[in-house]
Amino acid sequence: MSVSLINPAGAFDISSGVTKESGPFDLFKFGFKAYKNGQKKDAVEAYKYAAEKGHTGSRWALANMYAYGDGVAQNDFEAFKIYSQIASQGVEPGSEDTGFFVNALLALADYYRHGIPGSPVKTDLAQARQLYFQAASTFGVAEAQFQLARMILAGEGGSPNLQQAKKWLNQARKSGHPGAMAVFGNLLFQEGQTVRGLAFLTAALDRCSKKDCNWMEQMQEDAFSMSSEEDRRGAVALAQQLGKGADD
């Protein structure tokens, strides 16, 4: 990774004993501490030096800062390039860099799914689907399983396949992924498994994050409105069991 820095090492705290010549882990620790203290420019500089020395955690932190405009101007293409470097390294499942590698795969999949305006990165649904598949199958990441299932359902990047989508949704919902639980429940409901489907939709609402609750709630309300009172009562009772960890 080649990064051009404006200020050589002047931003570093001399008393810390950390300079641009320090080892990558020391630079990473300095960057992490600086970030936690709100000194994000110092953090960026330290992460860049550590990244030049091949430190994966620093690359990941730097990519996230570019992706979210956190301490630097937001630059999705710069983030994409750094995530790509992490992904190209490869990783053994269970190694200390696994989390960084998986995060990079998910970020790259999202970039390929939507493209980056004004950059060479164009929408490539087949590549996005492949990256989600890698994270879903090799690393068992629930979010990747959920996103892969959504792409399969929509026929994005390949042929639609309801049974394959249900398989990935089922795996993700068993890991407690609320979105997967809601979509899985909705598919069951549409197939005529009214009580089970409605139960999963209801249970998902107890676990959803704020940004996802609206669409899950709408999906659940639509199903509720089409159900009999008896089915509703059965679904609520089953949802409570699901909430306690029972896996139907």
Image: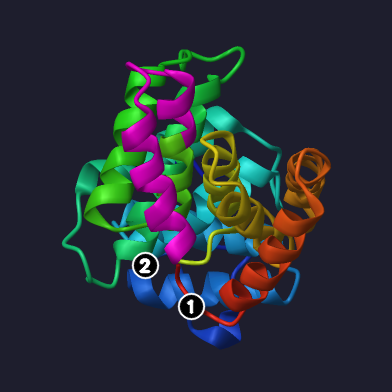
Question: Eyeballing the image, is 20 above or below 132?
Answer: below
Quadrant that contains the N terminus: top left
State the CA–CA distance, disc 1 to disc 2. Answer: 14 Å
The image quarter containing residue 87 is top left
Looking at the rendered structure, the secondary structure element under dot 2 is: loop
Identified by mark 2, the residue type is Glu
**Any magenta on residue 42?**
no
Q: In this view, does 149 lie to the left or right of 159?
A: right
The disc placed on residue 217 is none
Percent x, y of residue 83 = 41, 42
Q: Is residue 108 visible?
A: no
Mark sitting earlier along the chain (1/2): 2
Identify which residue, 90 or 134, lies in the foreground. Answer: 134
Q: Name the residue under label 1.
A: 29
**Any magenta on residue 156?**
yes
The disc placed on residue 21 is 2
Look at the image and give the residue range highlighted in magenta.
150-174
Residue at 45% over, 71% down: 247
Residue at 67% over, 61% down: 235
